[in-house]
Amino acid sequence: MEKSKVYFTDFRTQIDVSQGKKLQKLCRKAGIGEIDFEGKFVAIKMHFGELGNFAYLRPNYVKAVADVIKELGGKPFLTDCNTLYPGSRKNAVDHLTNAEMNGFNSVTTGCHVIIADGLKGTDDIEVEVPGGVYCKEALVGRALMDADVLISLNHFKGHECTGFGGAIKNIGMGGGSRAGKMIQHNDGKPQVNQELCRGCRRCARECGSDAISYQADGKAYIDPDICKGCGRCIGACSFDAIKNTSDSANEMLCRKMAEYAAAICSGRPCFHITLIMDVSPNCDCHSENDAPILPNIGMLASFDPVALDQACADLCLQAAPIRNSQLGDHLASEGWHHHHDHFLDSNPNVRWKETLEHAEKIGLGSREYELITMK
């Protein structure tokens, strides 16, 4: 069986050649022109970054991709779904304001922003999951499914639950409506280790379901009957006091995420672009971003999201960790159990390989790839 092709270029440029131009060249080299865009609505699925987070992709890269699509006759729009947790993207009004404040508008990108699951995150459509094991149907933002062509444009970074965020997470988790996100997150509920809890209350500020209260001694308590299992409190805790009570919870999240991505990609042309830069240890959904754990590596594009994510993961695993980072601190800690895996050493509870293994199993793509380097 022929390996999937993944095209790669680094961030080096010549005088008078911008990184945007280089990204456009990469997309053309990877075959974006093979898609029939003429008169078609094209969803550019991306993440606008939570307010306060500076690690998200700059709008300049988005414009470079949108301009190529328009040159090929397409009608691109930028899109994402509302979040399950509180923040600046929990409804379409706040989400659009967030996008505008982070620099995404028709002037800077050349296309409009449409929130895929509507005002309150309830405008979704039920989509069959091809080969679904855990989800037979996926609840997906309607505007995302109304598009004729899907372009995934994502910032590759670490993640506190899935190990990393790449093309599959951008599509699968990002494309789920609020109800769809709840379905993906609902295996396993977090629990507080009372000995480690400092009573800082940061977890409660991140909780999307008001499930966290405080006992007489100031320690946090998560009510399992109210908790949605979204995992935001895990990323919020600076003292590793909150963990999933189910050992398979992150594994199940990764598998469901892959199934949602398969549902969203099925039956229409899709093209995937990833930039490995500003590799923060946690998701762009945070209202802050810690220092990058790895150096900037490059830009990649492929028709196969599984091969693309695998290639990105491999390139990251080959890179040298940045000392002054979460990953660097862990590796330098006395007695640290070295996993020899940058994602695990940054966030030890993750099971990132589950995403790729299950995505390949259900036919979303292949982990076998040929990396084609473009200067």
Image (cartoon, rainbow, N blue to C red):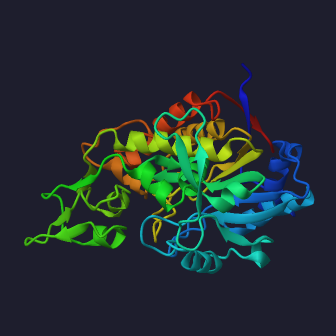
Total marks drawn? 0
In the image, is residue 176 above or below residue 216?
above
Q: Is residue 17 visible?
A: no
Q: Is residue 97 visible?
A: yes
* 242 lies above or below 129: below
The front one of 194 and 231 is 231
Please identify the quadrant where the N terminus is shown: top right
Q: Position of residue 111 (x, y in %)?
A: 78, 70
Of the 4 image quadrants, the one containing the C terminus is top right
- Quadrant hosting residue 341: top left
**Percent position of residue 248, x then y:** 34, 38
Residue 196, quarter of picture:
bottom left
Q: Position of residue 16 (x, y in %)?
A: 87, 64
Query: Which residue is drawn at the image coordinates 53% and 66% (left, top)?
Result: 122
- Is the residue 332 above or below the residue 222 in the image? above
Among all residues in the image, which is located at the extreme left?
216
Camera-side residue of 265 and 155: 265
Point 38% across, 49% down: residue: 347
- Between 131 and 48, the one lying in front of the other is 131
Q: In the current view of this chain or complex, which residue is farthest to the top?
A: 1
Q: Is residue 4 above or below residue 157?
A: above
Camera-side residue: 131 or 269?
131
Residue at image position (55%, 38%) is 318
> In the image, residue 257 lies at what x, y percent?
51, 45
Q: Is residue 359 left or right of residue 369?
A: left
